[in-house]
Image: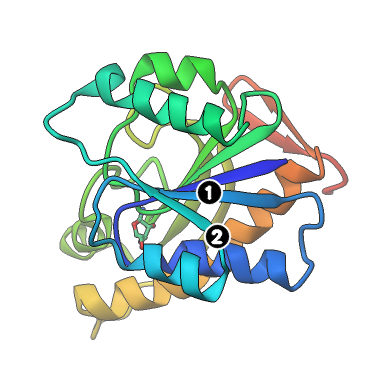
Amino acid sequence: MKLAILISGRGSNMDAILTAIRKGHMPQAQPVLVLSNLPEAGGLTIAREKFGLNTEVLVSNDLKGWEYDKNVMTLLQNYEISPTNGLICLAGFMRLLSPQFVSLFRNRIINIHPSLLPSFPGLHAQRKALEYGVKISGCTVHFVDKGLDTGPIIIQKSTPVLQSDTEESLSGRILRDEHLVYPEAIKLITEDRLKISGRMVLINGEH
Ligand code: GRF
């Protein structure tokens, strides 16, 4: 399965995914491309220099929705990444994908979010969790559907919220868990162990 990882920033989840692949944890996953909408995304350098991967930048230029996403689609085609052989991993990609793109790559796009969805979708999830006063937060890997952080959930991992937490300290602990669960979710998909039934993601071989 050919992986395209879409980022906008430092790329620590991307790094965790590529490290797991390099260690041989997902033999069926073939990383092909890292794409950013921002040229200054730190993850681009990591992808190139640490992993020798192809990187591409598609700046937004005020393009909205499908106008932008069709350029993404063309780029993926150039790398021979298709809805049948590909998996698109959003890892801090700060754009909402259009319904057209999501339909095209149906159940072939996944995302990681720093909360236990459906709590605190969207931006600043860790800050919202602190402000709300929850005692447990965490992270979620989910399939991407047409909504914002609403698709079927693949894996979640909980993280306790401490009384002394700041947004930074909580984000840091959640991030460490993100780096564990994102590669795990990709492994399950590349091993063809998931079945989507309505909102439920069933994991073959799990009891
Ligand atoms: C992570 O917290 C992820 O959950 C969210 O954006 C952040 C990306 O961080 N979607 P990084 O670029 O992977 O370090």
Q: At 88% from the left edge and 46% from the top edge, which residue is drawn?
A: 205
Q: Report the residue at 25% width, 59% height from top.
A: 129
Write down the quadrant of residue 44 in the picture.
bottom left
Q: SS of the residue at dot 2? A: loop
Determine which quarter of the picture holds residue 126.
Answer: bottom left
Tag 2: amino acid: Leu
User: x and y percent of residue 43 in the render?
Assistant: 38, 65
Figure check: 38 above or below 48:
above
Establish if 41 lies above or below 154.
Answer: below
Identify the residue at horizontal 61%, vertical 38% (top origin): 87
Quadrant where ligand 1 appears? bottom left
Apparent side of residue 15 relative to residue 26 in the rendered image (left or right): left
Q: Is mark 2 within 8 Å of ligand 1?
A: no
Q: Judging from the image, what secondary structure is the residue with disc 1 in?
A: strand
* Percent of width and height locating residue 101: 42, 20
Q: Identify residue type, mark 1.
A: Leu
Which image quadrant: the N terminus?
A: top right
The residue to which callout 1 is attached is: 33
Query: Which numbered disc flags the more N-terminal residue, 1 or 2?
Result: 1
**Foreground of the two, 100 or 35:** 35
* Residue 159 visible in rendering: no
Residue shown at 28%/47% (left/top)? Answer: 120
Compute the Cα span from label 1 to label 2.
Answer: 6 Å
Farthest residue, direction right? 205
Residue 157 visible? The answer is yes
- Give the crowd class for mark 1: few <14, some 14-19, many >=20 residues within 10 Å: many
Q: Which residue is mark 2?
A: 53
- Whether label 1 touches label 2, CB < 8 Å: yes
Looking at the image, which is closer to me, 52 or 128?
52
The part of the image, by quadrant, that contains residue 130 is bottom left
Q: Is mark 1 within 8 Å of ligand 1?
A: no
Q: Position of residue 163 (x, y in %)?
A: 25, 81
